[in-house]
Amino acid sequence: MAVWQFLSILFTGINLLLAVAIVFLERRNVGMTWAWLMVLLFLPGVGFLLYLLLGQNLSRRKLYKIKEEDKKKLDTIINKQRMLFKREALAYDDPMLQDYHDLIYMNLMSGYALYSQNNQVEIFTDGVSKFDALFRDIEAAKEHIHLEYYIVQNDNLGRRVIEALTRKAEEGVQVRFLYDDIGSTLPRHFFRELIRAGGKVAAFFPSRIPYLNIRVNYRNHRKIAVIDGAVAYIGGFNIGDEYLGRNPRFGEWRDTHLRIRGDAALQLQAHFLMDWNLAYPLKIPDSATGYFPAAPLPRRGKVGMQIVSSGPDNTMEQIKHAYIKMIHEAKSTIYIQTPYFIPDESVLTALKVAVLSGVDVRIMIPAKPDHKMVYWASYSYLGDLLEVGMKCYLYEKGFLHAKTVVIDGKVGSVGTANMDNRSFKLNFETTALLYDTETVSRLERIFEDDAEYCRVLTYEEYRNRPTLHKIRESCTRLLSPIL
């Protein structure tokens, strides 16, 4: 038997076994199942390698565990707030937010997202001001600093952050740094001085083989910083010079990040500690004190907030559900900014219904892609919405990486989740929901200011796109459930 015949039979056998595993064992949704079957059919051999990289559906119980006693503690806290909701005893500082009572309740029940109103929020739209503020807060830290980022670059900004953390560790401040092993490709010596100074560092879901990690799914895509449990950051900025606009390929980096003072910072603290306990060998015990105050925080502001997280550790897609509920609640406007727009059918249908109901739906994506296949797939879904009357803006002043949703200028979200399957199902994500007309109106104005640097994509232009573009969109759309 010729070698090529043997290889053909071998690849065919492997493809059949994988097909059986995908259809009968993994029990994925229909769209994802067909996408993988197509990859295996048309790319024998290569499809097998892609499946190893992108298709592994590891046991969620092994990946992420929350002890039963921890669940009971969370349930006790949630039940107290749930009773307030059922008695309608929760007083809203902004009376207009009573209309979003159901949204708040859903996030509370499905995602352990406590609602707090004692918050002050500062919005950043450029990396320089965001990191200037973060450096000031790090310098002022007295007790502990907790940082969690998907991407950490070994460049000028990355080294500045480590140097600042090292100085604080030498002063006796507890420093913990959690980074994702796929998002951050770092030399072994990168954290050496920080660790020598007493800081602790952990890689999320690392490979057992140095510099070789094939586990592309289930990454920690969160960007969280918590200082002394009093100040927290959440948003789209990672750590690297490109986020300061210093990468010639992208130019100006347009993102959105929040600085929070108040009760919502403690919710981000809880999420960090759970992620840390998953990644670091020596877990922080339940009895540890100093991370949560014994007495209520002093009044910081009046912004209502919930911290909603989702990931493969939970069968509920909390962030996606929050987006869908927000879209259904819209009466006049929906403004969305996202670098990647590959919604599943539930989100796409919700947006279509909103447009057809007379809601002004506007979606902004970057004009210059960083991942071409994802960009082509995005165009396909945008076409569906352009057809029914949605407005699409292509941001041309650098790269748009913001992940924001704004509803009627009253409710908004800023976080780490993109509008795609990877963020909804496969990655660990976190977003902050904001219930405050003043703060959310600022997000709405930011969108309108960004629109000045956009080119409007019309349905007529979309229909007249080149045939090659149509072919690329059709192919990538078929694969969109696994992108």
Image (cartoon, grey):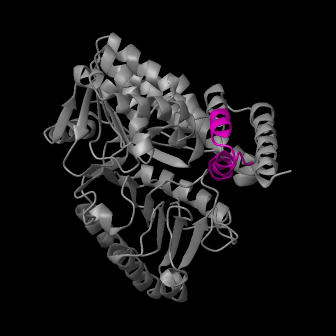
The picture quadrant where one finds residue 246 is: bottom left
Which residue is more in the foreground, 108 or 332?
332
Q: Position of residue 96 (x, y in %)?
A: 30, 25
Residue at 36% in and 75% down: 155
Q: Position of residue 71 (x, y in %)?
A: 70, 45
The picture quadrant where one finds residue 310 is: top right
Q: Position of residue 144 (x, y in %)?
A: 48, 72
The answer to whether residue 17 is above or below residue 221 is above
Which residue is more in the foreground, 382 or 221?
382
Residue 53, magenta (yes or no):
yes
Dominant SS type (magenta):
helix
The answer to whether residue 157 is above or below residue 426 is below
Q: Is residue 304 visible in the rendered structure shown here?
A: yes
Q: Position of 394 compared to 171: left or right?
A: left
Residue at 30% in and 36% down: 436
Residue at 66% in and 66% down: 207
- Magenta stretch: give its range: 37-58
The answer to whether residue 163 is above or below residue 415 is below
Residue 55, magenta (yes or no):
yes
Q: Is residue 329 visible in the rendered structure shown here?
A: no
The answer to whether residue 315 is above or below residue 398 is above
The residue most toward the left is: 452
Q: Position of residue 237 (x, y in %)?
A: 36, 57
Which residue is more in the foreground, 394 or 96?
394
The residue most toward the right is: 1
Residue at 57% in and 65% down: 181
Which residue is more in the foreground, 127 or 454?
454
